[in-house]
Image (cartoon, rainbow, N blue to C red):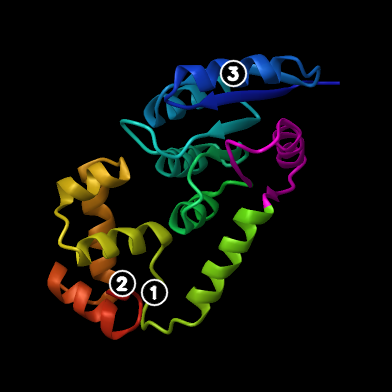
Amino acid sequence: MEAIKILIADDHPVVREGLFAMLSREVDFEVVGEAKDGVEAVNKTKELRPDVVLMDLRMPEMDGVEAIRQIKSVMPDVKFIILTTYSDDEYIFSGIEAGARAYLLKDAPRDDLFKAIRAVYRGESLIQPVVASKLLDRFSELSRRTPSGEELSARELEILCLMAKGAANKEISAELSIAQSTVKTHITNIFQKLGVNDRTEAVTQAIKKGIIRL
């Protein structure tokens, strides 16, 4: 039986070492590499071509969601499992939207992680019940919104909420662990979708349409 090739992307060395040791004991798993941030995750995935990537969310240089998006754009067959400490609704939604097939918290039992790796490798999905309930709540909330024009993505909604709080591009970049150029791209897309020309108008329109609430 061919082993499932796995890449571990996490900015904490202790976490990477622990996952490597744990996964290496399974006869059908082969850990082919590790990455300490999102940029390295993108480069090593292209180089090592793993079947499954275990992706943390909050990492320096580039966050896990952006790394997933960049990898999926050039290697659509790679499967992603988000393994993180964050159970915040926005992170869950952004991760699933980006293309992750499983979302596990780091305190999940090891058997759940093993099951998730094998499931996504087969093309299935696995989301912990505590995460699934939040994801369903989020979809329910979005279904009640009736904005005109194109729907904003989860990441665009996240940035729009920070804009509403008065955050500048640099602050948004730091908060979300993404490049300022990426922030600018998202804001341009927000303006286009809302049919506005500046940040104040974007926030005003979003509040009027019920897209965000202060």
- Drawn side of residue 13 relative to residue 140, left or right: left
Residue at the image point whose x is 61% and y is 21% from the top: 19
- Drawn side of residue 134 relative to residue 126, left or right: left
State the residue position of label 1. Answer: 150
Residue at the image point whose x is 42% and y is 25% from the top: 11
- Asked if the residue under mark 1 is in contact with the one under mark 3, i.e. CB atoms within 8 Å, the reply is no
Three-letter amino acid code at the position of disc 1: Glu
- Drawn side of residue 160 relative to residue 140, left or right: left
Q: What is the C-alpha distance between the residues marked 2 and 3?
A: 44 Å
State the residue position of label 3. Answer: 18
Q: Quadrant of residue 165?
A: bottom left
SS of the residue under disc 3: helix
* Mark 2 neighbour class, 10 Å CA radius: few under 14, some 14 to 19, many 20 or more: some
Q: Earlier in the sequence, mark 2 or mark 3?
A: 3
Disc on res. 181: none
Which residue is nearer to you in this view: 3 or 94? 94
SS of the residue under disc 1: loop
Q: Residue furthest right?
A: 1
What residue span does the magenta drawing correspond to? 102-128
- Asked if the residue under mark 3 is in contact with the one under mark 2, i.e. CB atoms within 8 Å, the reply is no
SS of the residue under disc 2: helix
- Asked if the residue under mark 1 is in contact with the one under mark 2, i.e. CB atoms within 8 Å, the reply is yes
Three-letter amino acid code at the position of disc 2: Lys
Which residue is nearer to you in this view: 188 or 31? 31
Q: Earlier in the sequence, mark 2 or mark 1?
A: 1
Residue at the image point whose x is 42% and y is 61% from the top: 154
- Residue 111 within the segment the image draws in magenta: yes
Residue 198 visible in the snapshot: no
State the residue position of label 2. Answer: 193
Which residue is nearer to you in this view: 114 or 122? 114
